[in-house]
Image: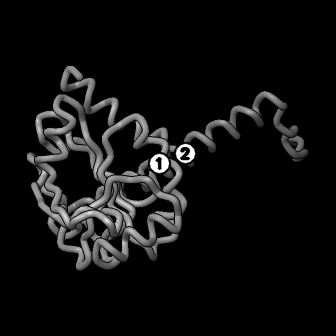
Amino acid sequence: MPSLSPAPPPTGRARRRAWLARAARDGLLLLALLWAVQAWQTRDVPSGAAPDFSAAAVLPPDRDAAMLSLAQWRAAHRGRPVALHFWAEWCGICRLEQHSVTRLAADWPVLTVATQSGAAPAVHAVQARRELPWATVADPDGTLLTRYGLKAVPAFVVVAPDGRLSSVSVGYTSEAGMRLRLWWAGLWAGG
């Protein structure tokens, strides 16, 4: 009659291998889920050329009101990818990203779009209070956000040197992720 004793416990190496296999499977599942969420959030983003716009520049109160367009911003940074960072005064995740955006703007051309946060003077007050030295345009009613097919903030958009949309992400984006997207857009453009 065969022995019905339990199987010996797995060795340390077998346990480690099983743990690594589970971790790899779970990691791939998480990456697939994150990719699916990002694809769903950006499903209405237009492909091809970045939609041009002209909006009220956020300037100190002692300066005359001015309009700033994406075409002007790109022309001022010819041959380089530029970033659009959509944010809102009331957005908690945007506040988590603000220091990353400030550091990024020291090295790359970043134009921020304050959406659904009031007119330019109100946005300037927020930026002054938070000490945000960003080049910003006001999008008081969310028109620009909608024009880009976005439904949430923060959103990080990279416009390649040739004017096409290179990368769009919604939700928190790390500083490294922002830099990598800009670098990649410049690399493929020969910049």
Q: Is residue 71 above or below residue 54?
A: above
Q: Closer to the camera, 40 or 14?
A: 40
Tell me the SS state at disc 2. Answer: helix
Q: Position of residue 4 (x, y in %)?
A: 87, 47
Image quadrant for the C terminus?
top left
Q: Nearer the viewer, residue 14 or 101?
A: 101
Horizontal and vertical percent position of residue 27: 55, 45
| Residue 161 in the figure: left or right of residue 97 | left
- In terms of secondary structure, where does tag 1 sit? helix
Residue at 22% x, 61% y is 43
Task: Name the residue at 18% across, 28% down.
Answer: 79
Query: Identity of the amino acid at label 2?
Result: Gly
Query: Residue at 24% of width from left, 36% of height from top?
Result: 81
Instruction: Please state the horizontal and vertical placement of residue 42, each as a whole percent of the image.
Output: 26, 59
Lower sequence index among marks 1 and 2: 2
Mark 1 or 2: in front is 1
**Where is mark 1, residue-wise?**
102
Q: Which mark is residue 30?
A: none
126 or 140: nearer the viewer: 126
Task: Tell me the kind of residue under disc 1.
Answer: Thr
Q: Is residue 63 above or below residue 12?
A: below
Q: CA distance from mark 1 to mark 2?
A: 31 Å
